[in-house]
Image: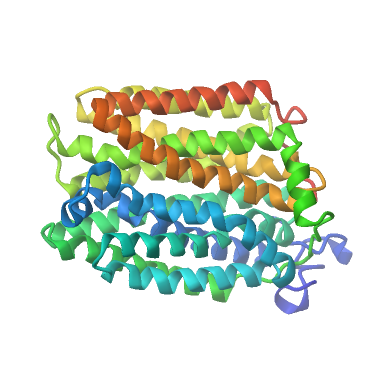
Amino acid sequence: MRGGRGGGPGGAESGEPGGADPRAAHGSATYRRALIALFCAGLATFAQMYSPQGILPDLARDFGVTAGTSSWAVGATTIGVALGVIPWARASERLGRIATMRLSMSIALVIGLIAPAIPSFSVFLAARFVEGVALAGLPALAVTAIAEIVRPQALGAAVGTYIAGTTIGGLIGRIVAGTVADWAGHTGAGWRLGMAAVAALAAVATVVFLIRIPPAAVRRPAPLPMLAALADNLRNPGVLALVAQAFLLMGGFVAAYNYLAFRLQGEPFGLTLAQVSWLFLAYLAGAVSSRWVWRIARRVPPTGVLLGCIGLMLAGLGLTLLPWLPAVILGLVLFTGGFFGAHSIASGLIDRRAGAGRVLAPPLYNLGYYAGSSLLGWLGGVAFAAGGWGATAAMIAVSALAAAALALLIRPRGAVVSDFGS
């Protein structure tokens, strides 16, 4: 399966005479086109996925539910993503990665436009779950699709750009939803208008993706059937360690952002929902770190980079315990940058660590990632109800330390990340 603008990305498009590798070289027109499309796809997906996170206090008041229960507005979607990644990966073996991603994003967009108008909390959660299943097509396939479009030497930067798009998407979803809800006066319609505004922005980004994404230059067939590929990964300690790290780090990250809004609206801060939502600008640190860590990873062992990022998360988390807003803001920036740096390294390594079952390795990583988001995101609410922000921060710290222990026990192959295979 070959393609690309002008009949194929070889020759001038690939940057190599004769097109020995038909995939796009770093800086080529196809490479830039793919990065724009995947950046928009990440933006659209994560804006929709996390738009309720900045408006949970209003959503909780409108539906008459607790803080912990309201977190399922995010958790239902991430559970859907966790359950959807492997079925979408299987579908892509028949339909192709790009066609499958187009289908999943189109379905998700329709549901995302409808969900804000649903009056019942239970039906709203059901719609968010189905939306998550649809959205799963992107995280399940993005890294594999990138590997089929761009050359191995360009893969790390391309993955970092995709993750930067997911970061900006999460940022925009939270800020737009919270700002519009605050403008509407915290009525029942306010948070709905906020989510609708995010869905409209996601629609624009989705259209850009559908138009701009180039076809795959190669098709990497699965060397094993799905069940055999699953068994191969379950026997691979390197893959399992990264899946567990995704669960632990993402779960702690979502718990922090779920309940920090409740903390900052209370004493001694007393911030409005709009003011809290602008603190999500800390996500910009993640957009930077998700690409920046790859420069370090070419000189420093991946374990060292991962541990450094987790250390940054813990340092930032400690600062959020202080009753001083500038310290909390700085802590949030450090925590966010550390998380996205760790996630970028881990998601880039998963394909490299996998063996014959590599087609299922990224979906398994995302299964752990979104399962952690749902389960630990909810557990953070249980901790918050029991002991406030201090208890939630303690739970997040334990998760991060467990991920660090796994990084030490199961080290990546090779000293540095210089190539991501074919």
- Side of 252 where 85 appears, left or right: right
Task: Give above or below for 336 relative to 408.
Answer: below
Q: Position of residue 167 (x, y in %)?
A: 45, 49
Q: Nearer the viewer, residue 47 or 107?
A: 107
Q: Position of residue 198 (x, y in %)?
A: 33, 64
Query: Which residue sits at x=20%, y=48%?
Result: 57
Instruction: Tell which of 22 and 309 is nearer to you.
Output: 309
Residue closest to the eye, 179 or 81? 81
Is 339 left or right of 259, judged from the image as shown? right
| Number of marks present in the image shown | 0
Q: Position of residue 362 (x, y in %)?
A: 65, 49
Q: Classify the position of the N terminus by image quarter.
A: bottom right
* Left-right relation of 170 to 249: left
Q: Position of residue 46 (x, y in %)?
A: 44, 56
Q: Residue at x 56, y 24 (%)?
A: 404
Q: What residue occupies the far bottom of the structure in this picture?
A: 6
Which quadrant of the figure has residue 255? top left
Q: Is residue 255 above or below residue 94?
A: above
- Identify the image's colour scheme: rainbow, by chain, secondary structure or one colour: rainbow
